[in-house]
Each structure stands twice: as structure tokens, then as C-alpha cells.
Image: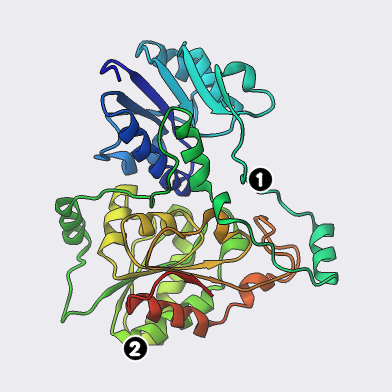
Amino acid sequence: MSATENILVRSVNWLGDAVMSTPALMRLRQARPGARITLLSHEKLADIWEDQPFVDELLTFSGSESFWQVGRRLREKQFTVGVAFPNSIRSALELWRAGIPQRVGIARAGRSLLLTKVVPPGADEVKMRKRSVMEIRRCIATDSATTVYSAAAHHVHHYLHLAAALGASPEIMSPRIEVSDDFVEKVRGKFGLTRVGGRPWFGLNPGAEYGPAKRWPAERFVAAARILQAKTRCRWLVFGGAGDRALAETITSDIARATGEPPLNLAGATSLRELAAALKICDLVLTNDSGPMHLAAAVSTPVVAVFGSTSPELTGPVFSARAQVVRRPAPCSPCFRRECPIDLRCLRGIETEQVVAAALTCLAGGVRKQT
């Protein structure tokens, strides 16, 4: 393979999707060891790509830039191959505007003419379609079974399928984000995350940017935190983005009242790279289906993930050996809606004791399962 091959990968725009794309990037690096691989990422995700071994260069764009502006900047780099991980028209337009001679992407209406190598969707690919309110009520009325998808439909396979179009192996790998020991220690010092008396740090991520249909009730997070602290003597870190500050403050106060010890609230206080390091410091992370869930699993921290409106078969931390997925079967699940139009039974049906049991199994080194 020529050392002058210059590959651009247009990354996805959401944290969880970005983490799920790392196996494809690692496989691409294996397949093209002599190539220069550049990643084009939204600037909000730039932090997590720093020092990753599968990327030679990182380019970013802002939300205010048009595809025309981004493509014009890319043109001067003279890329020989471009692959669009998102299925959007915009990502294909950026590669086209950049004048990249070989442009690779999944076939989708409205953009296939912009690509030179159109890749058919994978045989097991599932489109996450939001169920209508009428459909949800019909599922409940007929007491339908919870929809369960094939393991081959997981989004990790989508990105591997694209990388395979460039000769990479489609064999599964666990998502991985590298965080150096030096940076972990820097974050430990910045936020005071030293271990006192050998007590472990547990992380709690009660938010989910997608919407409330992915958020386990706050009072149950608090109840689980109280029980786990009593059983393990853990200290709690509360994670979240800037939009989760109010929720994190409420949960922090409620845990303090329940346990007599306030958690350390890091919601909105970390960069993404600092978040990855703090998650790596944790001995366990209790979380909703969210970007931090994927990030925690990708830095090899044991994870307990609560699923509601979404599908663990499609987006769960299922490639982590020490991840536990907790899900309550419901006729309307998964509905993929941001807000529940009925009674949030998929999440309200998950009891505190189930989550605590999954956490204790994780801590004991139990193998991955779904409860």
C-alpha cells in the first residue's frame, strides 16, 4: 500500500456514535498501515480524538460552517480517499466539494450520486424508526413482545461495514478510547479524586441528551446510590453535560441527604477528555443509555446501563466484558422516542434492586449479561 495514500474519514456528530465508530477506525489502521488517516470531526468532539493511535491528524468544523466552507478547506489537503461515516447528505457533499477522487459511503436517497463507491447497507442493518403513538397503543393493547434485534445489527457493525469497503476486516472489536496514565493522574489531581482509606469511586450519570424517555427516574438513581454506598463504602461522582447541571445538583443533594456524604458533582465541569479520564478512574459507572455510557465502556470501566426507549442490541455496551444491561420488557419497547407519550413503563418498571444487583455482579467480575 502506498505511503502517500491520504484518507479522510468524516466522523459522526454524537459522542456515543463516535465511540462506536472506533473499531472501524482501528480496523482501517490495520488494513492501511502506510496511509495517512485524517479524521474530520465536529469541534464539540475534538477532545476525545486527541492521542488516539488510529488517527494521524484531526480536522474540525463548527456548527456554523456550511458544507461548502468545510469542503473548500479540505480541498487543499488533496485527500485521495474519503469515507463518510454519517448517512447524511451533508457528509457526502463535503467529500464532493473537497474534490476527493474516491468517495465512499452507504447508499441513501439523495446522496448516492455524490459518491464514487456506493456501499449497500449491511444485511442486518436496522433503521431506528420512532414508533407513532397509535402504534405504541396498539402494541400495548395486543400485549406484543418486546422487539429484540440481532446482535449483528449493532451500530458498531455499521461502521465496520463501511471500513470493509476499503479492505478492512469486518471482524468485531470492542470500542476503545485511549487515555494516558499521565492524563488520568492530572485529572485525579485537578478534581481531587484521590482514594481515601481504599474507598472506591463510583460514577453516576443520570442524564441522557436524547431525551427523558432514556432517563431512569432520578429518585431511583438516588436509592441505588444509597444502597451501593452502604454495601461498598463507595464515594460518588455525578457526571453530565452543561444541560444536566440542574438534574445533577438535585441528585447530588438527595444523595447527600440519604447517605450523609455529598457526591462530587462534575456535571458541566469537564472537557470530554477529562470526562474520559474521570470515568476511567471509577471502579463502576451507573448510567442511562448515553454518550458517557459508551465512553465509560470504551475506557474499560465496569458499566451498569439502564435502557428504556432504545435498544441495547443496537447501541448497548455489549462488547464490554464487564457491562450489565438492565431492561424491562415492554410491548412498546423500543420506541426510539425522545419523550414517552404514555406512562414510561419501560423505565419505571426497572426496580432499584435490579440495578443494585447488576452493579454488585459487575464489581464481582461477572460476565456481561442482560437482565
Between 238 and 366, the one nearer to me in the picture: 366
Please give the name of the residue rendered at 80% of the width and 65% of the height, measured from the top-left corner. 139
Please give the name of the residue rendered at 34% of the width and 32% of the height, measured from the top-left corner. 31
Q: Nearer the viewer, mark 1 or mark 2?
A: 1
User: Which sits earlier in the primary sequence, circle 1 or circle 2?
Assistant: 1
Which three-letter amino acid code belongs to the residue tagged 1?
Lys
Q: Residue 91 at x, y = what percent? A: 53, 26
- The vertical placement of 152 against 288, above or below, is above
Which three-letter amino acid code belongs to the residue tagged 2?
Lys
Q: Is residue 306 left or right of residue 112?
A: left
Q: Residue 156 at x, y = what percent? A: 48, 47
Corner quadrant of residue 140: bottom right
Which residue position holds label 2? 231
Q: Is residue 90 left or right of residue 165?
A: right
- The vertical placement of 367 against 275, above or below, is below
Please give the name of the residue rendered at 50% of the width and 45% of the height, measured from the top-left corner. 157
Camera sees residue 257: no
Which residue position holds label 1? 127
